[in-house]
Each structure stands twice: as structure tokens, then as C-alpha cells.
Image (cartoon, helix red, strand yellow):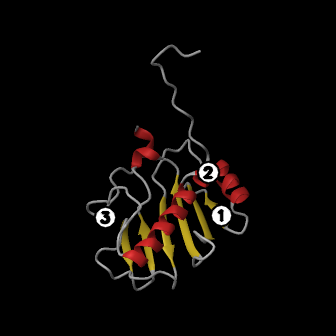
Amino acid sequence: MASKGQFYKSSPLSLVQQKVALCLAYKDAKCNIDKKKNQLFWIGKIRPTAFSYEYTVFLLYQAGKSPKVWVMGDELERLDDVNFPHKFDVDAENKMVRICLYRYSEFNSSKLLANTIIPWTVEWLYFYELWLATGEWLGGGEHPSDGKPKVEDINKE
């Protein structure tokens, strides 16, 4: 038993473990691992509510780095709006946006992408649709200041 005040760091999950969890949770999505680059790719369709559009989501996760998530497709609206919320960058021409989902301290490599990043993406899409309807971001959180990740190495914490 650990003594009072003593904490143990969780072990990082392998890309294979991440892939298995993603494939089990999202059976219609596609997931692959690039062993040379030590990264995982996931692409799937997400519908935040029964009345929502179905959005295409692309996840790129390199072991030891912060996951990157893009939403793409014709369903995206107001990509050219300077007030487009919680994004790192927007590619209006290709109809895709890299979204800001969390504070970097909220994810580390011992957490499953299937239990964190994908549900957070569903939540982001829900608040995105509310923003489209109201013009106000109701999802809380912090905006990235300059479009660049604050920390790339998530295992240093």
C-alpha cells in the first residue's frame, strides 16, 4: 500500500491497446497504426444528437504526443467566421477544422482515446451546433492563444 502523499504514475497505453479500444467502441470507424511513425489514425462518423448532422472526424495520435482531431466535410458551417470557436486552425477550402478539446493536463497516454478524446469530440460538436444557432460558445473551456499546441509532450507531467 502506498504511503500517504505517495502517487504512482500510470503506465502509457500502447497504440495497439488504443486501437483495440477504439475498434470495440466504434465498430463502423476505421483505425490503423503506422508502425514506422509510431502513430495511430482513426476516422469515423459522429452524430452528437439524434437531430444532428453526421460529421466526419479524423484523429491522429502519435505515442507520447497530444492527440490531434479534425472535423471535416460539407456539414461544417461558418468556417470563415473569425469567431469560430475552440479551434487550432481552419482550412475552409478543404472544409476541415482542427478542434481544441481539452487542457493538455486533462489527457495523458495512460488514458484511452475511446473514453476521452472521442466523447470530448461529441461534446464539442454538440456545442458547435449550439454556437451555430445562438452565436455564443456555451461549452466553456479556454481558447488556444496563437493556434499552436501549448505542450506537445503529454508525458512530462
- The residue shown at (40%, 49%) is 104
* Mark 2 residue type: Leu
The CA span between labels 3 and 1 is 27 Å
Question: First in sequence: mark 3 or mark 2?
Answer: 2
Is the residue 94 above or below the residue 129 in the image?
below
Question: First in sequence: mark 3 or mark 1?
Answer: 1
Quadrant of the frame with the N terminus: top right
Q: Secondary structure at mark 1?
A: strand
- The residue shown at (32%, 52%) is 150
Judge left or right: residue 103 versus residue 61. Answer: left
Residue neighbourhood size for the residue with mark 2, other residues' Cα within 10 Å, grouped as few (<14), some (14–19), many (≥20): many
Question: First in sequence: mark 1 or mark 2?
Answer: 2
- The residue shown at (51%, 85%) is 74
Of residue 48 and residue 100, the one placed in the foreground of this image is 48
> Which circle, 3 or 2, is nearer the viewer?
3
* Mark 3 residue type: Gly
Could you say which disc has been placed on residue 15 in the image?
Answer: 2
Location of residue 145 (image quadrant): bottom left
Coordinates of residue 124 in the picture (x, y in percent)? 48, 64
Of residue 40 and residue 46, the one placed in the foreground of this image is 46
Residue matched to label 3:
147
Residue matched to label 1:
31
Residue at the far left in the pictured view: 146
* Mark 1 residue type: Cys
Coordinates of residue 122 in the picture (x, y in percent)? 55, 64
Q: Is residue 23 visible?
A: yes
Quadrant of the frame with the C terminus: top left
